[in-house]
Amino acid sequence: MRSVKCCLNPIFIIIAVAAVLSQSLTVTSVVVPKSNCYVLDNSSRLLDFSDWVGVPFAHEGKDSDLVIRFCKDVESRSQTGYVDFGRYDKYNYFVAGSGHVYLVQEFYNGDLLNCEHTFDKMGRTAQVNIICGNCLNGQCKGQQSCICNVTYESTCRVIVDLAIPCENQAHGFEGFTVGFHPRSWEIVYNGLTQLGFEKSHRDFSFSTEQPHVTLYLTAIAFQSNLVRKPVVKIFPENGLEVKVSGSGVNGKPPTTLSPSTLLLDWRCVKAQNSPYEVKISIPVEGYEPIEFVLTKMCEYTQNQEEDATRGWAIFGIISCILMVSSTLFCCVGFIYKTQMGSQHGIDALPGMAILSACLETVSGAGQGYSRVVDVNTGSANEVSWERPSSAAQGTWTPSESKYGSV
């Protein structure tokens, strides 16, 4: 009876309801691991082995021991020294296996001694077959993980079976990207939220002067219909006004050839030292939601929404008024000069006389040889080559003769 009364206590009920609500509002985001030692398996499950990086696994042999440093390298150790059978390449991640082998890791660029002519001159190489669970031959009894078997194909290549526990984590939406450009993925790549956008970061924040930001969403075509409309939450709730628009808000399926967009227009209503957090959650049917956080700084208050575009609007209005006034002035002037000034064609346009004078001044017209017009013949282009009379020019002497004088 006491237990029933305890359960019916109002305080207990309030605490229970608050716990349920807090759990319903909590959404697990699939964030890219802190290292490159991870894989998305065939079912898009994220397997993160970041805590296993560098963990050694040893296998004792007759002449030498084989040691695997997980996601590092493979070595053969003996009294004569160490022989490197390859290093983990960050560009060659895990590959899906077959049968009892769940994943496969390849190690390249080992020691070249006596292996100079191997495939692509990569030296010694190793292949690590990862088995999730225990060894089939019962090698790992009482151990969480160990090397099950070691097979030397040659002195230059070794194949190792490694049994480790594989803990499935979040179900990522493979092939989904979010970026600031249709062909970029700064925020989300392959369904994984990139570092810097998994939570609030001042180094990745947007300045107060930036009034909007455009996000581009892409997905594999046959899975694009699984993407739902995004949900936007702001923290703190008061102080930052955010308006979301674009094809992504309307539920358009994003594809690689036709990305959907999210346009965020934000305005700082209240200034504060700490940044505002804009959390965007994109639900995906059958997968974990895609979540990321955009950080916005508000160093001062933006009183009106149209502050950023007011200057351009005023400039556009003034430009239109000037263009219309100039057109009317030219038309009126042209009609007046045509009717009253007896001018026709381009000469009737206002300002043509001033423009012609300026062009003549710039081109140097009026300088150099002068043209003599023959009034008898009416030809203005003929140049007189006759000797000038003494009455007009004074006494002429041979020393004053200049060819080409007018």
Image (spheres, grey):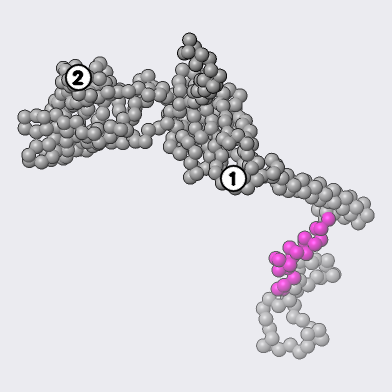
Find the magenta span and give its range.
350-369
Residue 11 included in the magenta stretch of the image = no
Q: Secondary structure at mark 1?
A: strand
Residue 328 in the image: above or below residue 160: below
- The amino acid on which the numbered mark 2 sits, given as a three-letter code, is Cys
Residue reaching furthest to the front: 2
Give me the C-alpha separation between circle 2 and circle 1.
58 Å
Task: Tell me where residue 232 appears, x and y as whole percent.
Answer: 57, 29
- Rendered-image quadrant of the C terminus: bottom right
Task: Tell me where residue 44 appears, x and y as whole percent.
Answer: 39, 22
Q: Residue at x 60, y 26 (%)?
A: 249
The dominant secondary structure in magenta is helix
Work out whether mark 2 precedes mark 1 in sequence or the reverse, and give the earlier one.
2
**Quarter of image, res 308:** top right
Residue reaching furthest to the top: 1
Residue 18 visible at all: yes
Residue 356 in the image: above or below residue 251: below
Along the horizontal axis of the image, is 166 left or right of 394?
left
- The amino acid on which the numbered mark 1 sits, given as a three-letter code, is Gln
Q: Residue at x 27, y 18 (%)?
A: 98
Q: Which mark is residue 272?
A: 1
Residue 124 visible at all: no
Circle 2 residue: 135
Q: Which mark is residue 225?
A: none
